Image (cartoon, rainbow, N blue to C red):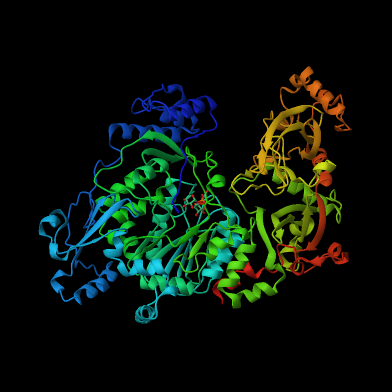
Amino acid sequence: KNDGQLKLSKQLKLPPDKVVNNKLNNHVNQNKTSRIKLDYNLLNFTPICDVTGKEAVSAITRAKSQICKELIVNVTCMGLQGTLYPKRLYSSCPHSMGFNKNPKKIGCYQDDKTHRMLTGFYTVLKSNNSPEQCALLCLQYGYPYAGTEYSVECFCGVEEPSQTKRLLDSSCNMKCSGDPRQSCGGYLAINIFKTGIKSFKAQEARNISTKIAHEKPARIAFLLTVNGRASRQVKRLLSVLYDPSHFYYIHVDARQDYMYREMLEIEKSCRYGNIKVAKGPGLRHASIWGGASLLTTLLSSARKMLEYSKNWDFLVNLSESDFPIKSNKQLVEFLTLNKGFNFVKSYGREVQRFISKQGLDKSFVECEARMWRLGDRKLPQGIQIDGGSDWIALNRNFIEYVSNPKPDELVSGLLKVFKYTLLPAESFFHTVLRNSIYCDTYIDNNLHVTNWKRKLGCKCQYKAIVDWCGCSPNDFKISDINKIRNTIDKNLFFARKFEPIIDQRIINYIEEYLYPMKFNNINRANSKNSYWQSLYHHGDLSPPVDDVLLTITNSLVRIIYSKYYHLNNNNYNFKLLEASVYFSDNKYQGILILAEASNKIIESSTIYDNNVNYYPERLEALVLSPRNFSTSKLWSNRILNLHVSTDYDQKEQTFRNFLSCVGPLSSPILSYEFDLSFVTPKNLTIFWIDTNNYLRDVNQIQVDETTLIGSIKPQLDEPLTIGKWNIFILADNVLIGQVNFFVTPLSFLNNHEINIKKIRDIHNGPINQKKLINNNNQKWINFLKTIGINLNENYDNNSNNIIEERTGDELNNWIDEFVKKYYKIDKICIANEFINNNVFKKLNLDKCTQTNWSSLSPDPKADINNICYT
Ligand code: UDX
């Protein structure tokens, strides 16, 4: 039921300083006050206090830069001195159980700005023939949070909360239980909210439609915080959400050049000017997962959105992986009826449990794109802490209040607290809402349905970014469609998460259901079931590209152009422009390489300036990467897949490295998928054997019906030996499956051409190569031979004595040999609009725009012309 986040703290694992790390892990369940000495030699500054807490010392030790170490020290010291956080804050919620600095009269209390719905309720009571008793006062006992663990009593009468009990009119005392807002303010909203507009009785429906007819439709400001490279999906989201009367503000993670350029293009092409992209240092942030910067992003974006547009009523935040599940019309109707309310989702259980699961009782500090855990802290007294999900729909007044550059004491106090809080956006808005004059406008619904599969989504997958084990929801697949169907009569308007590389069918399904007419366009196009996602773009400076990807894709450019040009012909420069991954019918098809050959002579000559007809010759190629696994006869139906690559996503159980390229510094992983018919649990043994027939690792896995899909990461000494590797899988000493992959030499290191020193370091296998030639290794190899396993044939006994130092063309040729063996160039098209070149003219190639597979072929799902021009 709980849509909020469950954060696991138990198995905290911290990279990469293993010594400190292990101690820290143990420390989690040990005495919290344990202390440790900080090595002052690590610092080039004098700490302002003596740091002894284990977590802080670990953070300082692991942080790389002095500036980050200093920040951690300073924040820790301020925490110890008690100057970091306010000790007490005051709630201005009229009926708060906390300390009320300025108690306000409630009951008939009517705030034009925020209590519109209360007015409606007030009228109803008034018609009860007791106008003086119109006031409704709700006292909350126990935990004043949504859910069942508190009781609520409502009384008629008018008084200040501190004196309520004495002045109550007991004659009209009515008891209620459950959600306080059912009987307090927000009655109507909750009612609509619970029943769903569609299921209203005729009279009620008439009332509602009269109300809607008299109301100005709510205007929405969408805040899109986007990250990654799925720009076509973001365009699709925008084209589905777009309406000239709404406002769209797009924040792209400061490190994502590609997505940023793509979004700028949309902003530029939108003729209504209501799509804006966050630009510049104060407005663009590196909003890491769970980071304090995500709150900074939301607040700075909110301020800018208020400034840009005076018209909107609600701010709704979405990410690249959200998608609507109701039409815009339905969303607008709902928000029109509920203007003045604020929609957030609460954890829904004991607040103390939430605080500890969420790490709210610990200080975290953000630097080096990481949230470092510093140790325990005390949250301010006098206020209610609340939180859940950071997907919200907040009204303009509340946004003005919470993002005010000159905040009041409550907001400024909470900002201090949340500056050093993990996942701050999941609690900040809730807590402000609960403790401010807007407390009556709190609705426990964030309008989202979230696909939680905690077994998959809570695998501590963010430990490289945060000192905590965080969870993420899963992507919706077509098999999850009922979860979406079940929301039909609920006030849920968005779902998350969606990724077309995981499943585009469900996105098509929803879009067609919501907008059948518009979908005709998509239906008619060949690309309905296709999806393209960028892997590389030559214009990107950030984030850094994987050197192995750069090596292989550049090799592919050489191979592609060698079909048509003499590569040694110095008249041409060959350049990789883009690499993308191509999916069709929900299946990975291959990699696309877009490249150009430019004629140096023409480009450097004066003719070039005047010759408008000259265009570098561009090609795009579809490259296949055949999968290389085989099984024994007996196991051919039981082993569905064996594959080696890097960047395995445990949540979605798939590799994110689509090219499956492995280099000497990579961490390869074997993924496996067994069939359901695999009924008897089996222990399998996995042998990793390098190109020189050395056994590099042996793993054991247990497979039963609950672990049919999984992965195994071997412990391999780096750098990995260049060449073909074999993996053999044995069950009861019998070979049941095998798969091979290759480790490519690198032509790039840290995104620059690799130098000879690094070549020698990296292309000669692990340093302890010799150590491996021992009896044990030989024993295993002999064993594998005796059971009939064929090892690498072209194994060269002397290879270890030669120092590998190929460079330049020789290195490139070596790489190209591997690439040709493992990848297949399937199709090539011409990417130029005008063909001005003799080489091309002679070729019988399709134009890319006229193919089904090219990234340049029409894709109405993600066509920006469909966004602002319809
Ligand atoms: C889940 C919850 O749904 C979310 O409420 C919580 O903040 C984090 O956990 P999850 O799927 O894990 O979400 O995160 P994701 O959607 O990938 O990222 C959250 C937001 O941060 C997105 O808007 C995303 O674009 C942004 N982000 C993430 C960045 O800007 N940069 C990053 O490096 C990572």
Q: Position of residue 810 (x, y in %)?
A: 82, 38
Residue 157 left/right relative to 831: left
Residue 331 left/right relative to 207: right
**Quadrant including the C terminus:** bottom right
Which residue reaches farthest left? Answer: 166
Residue 743 left/right relative to 793: left
Which one is in front, 410 or 833? 410
Q: Residue at x 67, y 47 (%)?
A: 657
Q: Residue at x 28, y 47 (%)?
A: 413
Count of labels in the image: 0
Residue 692 seen in render: yes
Q: Position of residue 527 (x, y in %)?
A: 70, 67
**Quadrant including the N terminus:** bottom left
Locate residue 404: give its quadrant: bottom left
Locate residue 208: give its quadrant: bottom left
500 lies above or below 24: below
Q: Position of residue 36 (x, y in %)?
A: 41, 22
Which one is in front, 533 or 711? 711
Which residue reaches farthest front? Answer: 680
Which one is in front, 438 or 825? 438
Q: Position of residue 775 (x, y in %)?
A: 79, 17
Locate residue 396: give its quadrant: bottom left
Which residue reaches farthest top? Answer: 775
Residue 404 seen in render: no
Which one is in front, 101 or 406? 101
Q: Residue at x 86, y 64 (%)?
A: 838
